[in-house]
Image (cartoon, rainbow, N blue to C red):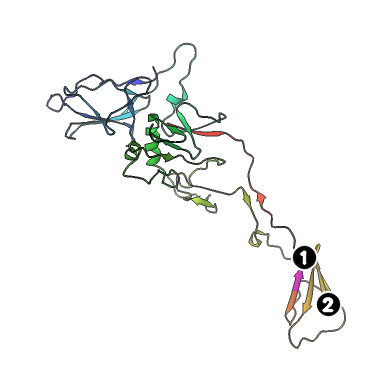
Amino acid sequence: MAAFSWPLSRQTVLDLNGNAVAGAQLRFFLAGTTTPLIAYADDALSVPLPASPDFIASDAYGRWPRVYLPYRNYKEEVRSAAGVLLWNDDGIANPAPASSGGGGTVPDSERFKTGDPKWSFEPGQISGFVRLNALTIGNAASGATERANADTEALYIWLWSRLDNIVCPVAGGRGVSGAVDYAAGKTLGLPDWRGRAPFGLDTMGNSTANRLAGATFDQGNGATPGAYGGRAYNTLVQANLPAVAPTGTVSGSLNNITAVVGAGSISITPGGAGTTAAQGLFSASLPVTFSSPLTFTGNPLGSSAAFNTMPGFGLVTWHLKL
């Protein structure tokens, strides 16, 4: 079986006085969060519940329908038809059953939780996952380009609540919640990790490490989940050059002086009103100070071409669990 049969299925829910509660409101969440957990009417997890976008209602006799949940720890909340809280139980363990016989393993689609990343050499889609390729997800009627299916709801809400609209844009703009936008058929853009590598946040629950202080960000900053930036190529400017004091000799008459520094040459011509040129040849070590304005003409070195800053790398496809 690919799913867990909720133990209160087909049972009658009672209020605090022991009376059956018609129309009782049942909601599921991922354990320890406010992220909704989608329940299903079949063990193949192909028919999502509820018909209402917010809760599963009990019938006129207070009985729940048959409910199936994916294998992950969860929280259940039950309220009366009037919204009075009856119970809210968190941290309910629901691990996938151990494999038996034949050395089988639990599929990734059951072992990973919503929002968990995984890399693979498979360039196409993997069952239970979508790719971080800047395409979109949404419900079956949304027209989403990466996946348009009811099984995207949990990830849609998970991303909507964690990453901003620049990283995960919602078609037509964001509404009051991820659940409302999903039900309205709006698509949500997946993070764009094409040609990008993951780095740790510069804070990660601690003080700033300042390891990303000089990084170039196109969006966000070192403390923003989903922020991105960096450059594959850089061009040096003069301020990036090493601080080197030139050495060499200057020789010639004051009217026609050539300074030789390494392989380059600089022509120096004295100028300015009232300049009197001294006669004869001289030689001196740099730096040389002249009392009149001078014009320097030098041969440029280098071409200012950008250089590659990429480290060694290997290419994979990044996937995210639905």
In the picture, measured across the screen, residue 240 lies left or right of residue 167, that is right
Identity of the residue drawn at 15% across and 24% down? 20
Q: Locate residue 81, reporting x and y percent.
A: 17, 32
Q: Locate residue 38, reporting x and y percent.
A: 34, 29
Q: Is residue 110 magenta?
A: no
Residue hosting label 2: 256
Residue hosting label 1: 299
Q: Quadrant of residue 63?
A: top left
Name the residue at the bottom extreme: 274
Q: Locate residue 276, reporting x and y percent.
A: 79, 86
Please provide the residue range marked out in magenta: 296-305
Which is more N-terminal, label 2 or label 1?
2
Cβ atoms at labels 1 and 2 below 8 Å apart: no
Q: Amino acid at mark 2?
A: Asn
Q: Locate residue 193, reporting x and y percent.
A: 52, 40
Which element is circle 1 on? Answer: loop
Q: Is residue 133 placed above or below 276 in the rendered structure?
A: above
For the residue pair 221 and 141, the one nearer the viewer reads as: 141
